[in-house]
Image (cartoon, grey):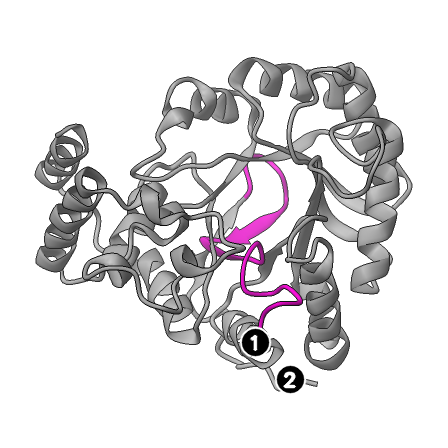
Amino acid sequence: MHPADPARYAQKSFQARCGKSGLHLPKVSLGLWHNFGSVDDYANARAIALRAFDLGVTHFDLANNYGPVPGSAEETFGRILREDLGAYRDELIISTKAGYTMWPGPHGDFGSRKYLLASLDQSLKRMGLPYVDVFYSHRRDPHTPLEETMGALAQAVRSGKALYAAISNYDPADTARACALLRELGTPCVMHQPKYSLFERTPEAGLLDVVEKEGLGCAVFSPLAQGMLTDRYLQGIPADARAGKPHGYLRPEQLDAVRMRKVRRLAEVAAERGQPLASMAIAWVLRDRRVTSAIIGASKVAQLEQCVAAASSAPFASEELKRIDAILAG
């Protein structure tokens, strides 16, 4: 069993209340979307997870389809729990999701009661857990009544297989409606998980207002835009980078000349602030008081440490924010 760092909670401000609930999340959470699959090195994944916990990162975010292969990230994390972190289970916030394709046929995708609850059972088996802390509907199903999807989340909570219900990738209107339905069912929605970064600002168009009005926590994913908002690609695509992997979601064509010119100018701003671009990008999403936590991915322990350091960044001056907006608009 891993001997955890006794100073992991020394920085009290690193933990933030999740909306109006009693749940607290670290300002930087570890997502297992990448680097924890069956194609990845287990020793490296283990080192990242254990270092994260020692730094006070208590929230580990998964989904049924994380890998590759789908499901293997949960299996990897289950092994880490068995061998290293199981003794600290009551300190951990473990979340998982269902909503994307996991098996053939009409009940292996989207938001039916059958899919969500079967998927949760499979996730618990892969991780070796009796319950998860947070269970998400990963995306809105346009063909299934929202009442059915929210009813499945409520059933997951009532059954004791999840402590909290949450949603991800829902637009503002569906977020408000989902929250109303879950309140009626006696299992309030605790959190929304949208994509948010310097390059993806859609949540600013109404979603963050709904999050605040509904009293939700907000854990944003891809705050580094799949790694674009780091120093990693300033001189091209390294051989071991995400954009160079056949199973990655960041493709080389996304690193075009216009985008990279903006990245380099943003890196200049970060350097003037005395921090790496990744730290500044995370600090930027955390600047909004409606954002509870930034969910980061890391392929190395050093990357993780750089990201966690962002939570103690200096506040942005108004001129810095104007300059960043000008770069993004250019």
> How many numbered markers are drawn?
2
**Residue at coordinates 54% horizontally, 20% vertically from top-left?**
171
Image location (x, y in percent) of residue 314: 21, 54
Residue 203 screen position, x and y as percent: 42, 26
Q: Main secondary structure of the magenta part?
A: loop
Q: Which residue is the site of mark 1?
A: 50
Instruction: Tell me the amino acid under the disc marked 2.
Output: His
* Left or right of residue 179, residue 24 in this image: left
Q: Give the SS element for disc 2.
A: loop
Q: Please state the extent of the stretch shown in magenta in the rendering.
A: 18-40
Decide if residue 156 is on the left or right side of residue 200.
right
Looking at the image, residue 41 sits to the left or right of residue 180; the answer is left
Q: Tell me the quarter of the image containing the N terminus.
A: bottom right
How packed mark 2 is, by other alpha carbons closer than 10 Å (few <14, some 14-19, many 20 or more), is: some
The image shows residue 53, relative to residue 182, as above or below, that is: below
> Is disc 1 placed on a helix, strand or loop?
helix
Dot 2 corresponds to which residue? 2
- The one nearer the camera, 211 or 330, is 330
